[in-house]
Image (cartoon, rainbow, N blue to C red):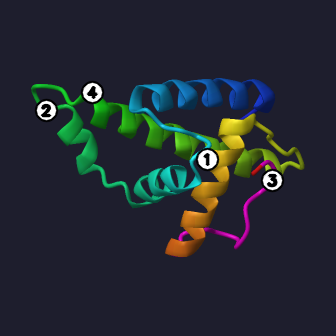
């Protein structure tokens, strides 16, 4: 992303879409084990999941997960970008819950760059 960014609006938009996918998938955001398992799945996500989601008949549950994982990547990228210019992106409860789980899983898998999450998680 280049140029002026509206990180506040971005975080609100991303969180709203994460919440929608969570409803479709029946995610209980207050269940730490369920959210951590979802984060683990997002970190371990493989591109073939998208192909599997789009086969006929379409697997709408798998498609919602793939979309959720894409939103997770956008969420993490937004936090990294905003932190790099000194602005901490703060979403709501779902944002923070999912972000913490994603960062924990990224650390556990050794995929976290820089060793610690940017502000907002």
What is the crowding at mark 2: few (fewer than 14 residues within 10 Å), some, or many (at least 20)?
A: few
Q: Residue at x 63, y 60 (%)?
A: 103
Instruction: Kindly report the secondary structure that dominates the magenta region of the rendered protein.
Output: loop
- Cβ atoms at labels 4 and 3 below 8 Å apart: no
Tell me if residue 81 comes above or below residue 101 in the rendering.
Answer: above
Tell me if residue 22 comes above or below residue 82 in the rendering.
Answer: above
The residue wearing badge 1 is 98
Q: Which of the two labelled residues, at mark 4 and mark 3, occupies the earlier sequence position?
A: 4
- First to last magenta residue range: 110-120
Mark 2 → mark 4, Cα distance in angstroms: 10 Å
Residue 55's tag is 2
Mark 4 → mark 3, Cα distance in angstroms: 36 Å
Whether residue 39 is visible here, answered yes or no, is yes
Question: Which type of secondary structure does the marked residue at label 2 adopt?
Answer: loop
The residue wearing badge 3 is 84
Mark 2 → mark 3, Cα distance in angstroms: 39 Å
The residue wearing badge 4 is 60
Mark 3 → mark 1, Cα distance in angstroms: 21 Å
Mark in front: 3 vs 1? 1
Quarter residue 5 falls in: top right
Q: Which of the two labelled residues, at mark 4 and mark 1, occupies the earlier sequence position?
A: 4
Q: Quick check: 46 left or right of 102?
A: left
- Cβ atoms at labels 2 and 4 below 8 Å apart: no
Q: Estimate the x, y position of residue 119 in percent, counting from the top left.
A: 82, 53
């Amino acid at each position: 992303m280049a140029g002026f960014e509206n990180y506040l609006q971005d975080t609100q938009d991303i969180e709203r879409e994460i919440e929608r996918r969570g409803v479709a998938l029946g995610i209980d955001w207050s269940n730490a084990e369920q959210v951590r398992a979802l984060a683990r799945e997002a970190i371990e996500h493989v591109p073939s999941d998208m192909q599997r989601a789009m086969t006929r008949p379409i697997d709408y549950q798998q498609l919602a997960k793939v979309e959720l994982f894409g939103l997770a990547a956008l969420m993490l990228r937004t936090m990294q970008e905003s932190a790099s210019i000194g602005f901490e992106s703060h979403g709501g409860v779902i944002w923070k819950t999912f972000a913490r789980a994603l960062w924990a899983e990224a650390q556990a898998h050794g995929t976290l760059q820089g060793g610690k999450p940017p502000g907002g998680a």
